[in-house]
Amino acid sequence: MFPKRLSILGREYRIIREKSGHLGADVVGRVKVELQKIWIDRRSHKQRQKAVLLHEIIHVLDFHHGVDLDEKQTEALACGLYEFARRNRHVWCKFSR
Ligand SMILES: [Zn+2]
């Protein structure tokens, strides 16, 4: 199941899975912090969509904390976190308890 809404730093973000390529030719995800919306290309593989969602969440964290990550750093963190979550599901689920 893909989330429709997420709370990020106390702000509710709407997750919109686009089906028609509105994001652009090579764009698979986008975030607009001022609108609190994240778009994900639903045509890509489910695992890719999850990694893209993490990527966009990192952009939100970066924006609010003023870290100033570039795209390469953002993607590296997203891939690393996704891999961690995938391989440590038993631990990941316990984080929220
Ligand atoms: Zn990005």
Image (cartoon, rainbow, N blue to C red):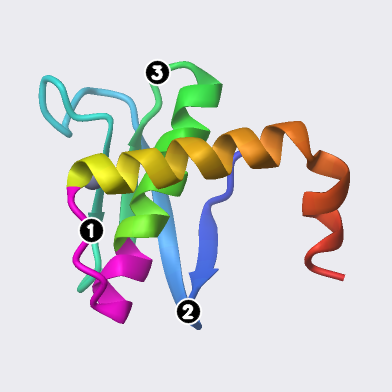
Residue 61 sits inside the magenta stretch: yes
Q: Mark 1 points at which residue?
A: 69
**Is residue 1 visible in the rendered structure shown here?**
no
Q: Nearer the viewer, residue 79 or 97?
A: 79
Residue 70 lies left or right of residue 73; in this view the side is left
Span colored in magenta: 60-70
Q: Name the residue under label 2.
A: 9
Q: Give the vertical position of 47 relative to 84 (above or below).
A: above
The kind of residue on which mark 1 rests is Leu
Residue 25 lies left or right of residue 7; in this view the side is left
Q: Position of residue 33 (x, y in %)?
A: 24, 68
Query: Which is more N-terminal, label 2 or label 3?
Result: 2
Q: Name the residue under label 3.
A: 44
The kind of residue on which mark 3 rests is Ser
At 17% from the left edge and 34% from the top edge, which residue is drawn? 23
Residue 83 sits inside the magenta stretch: no
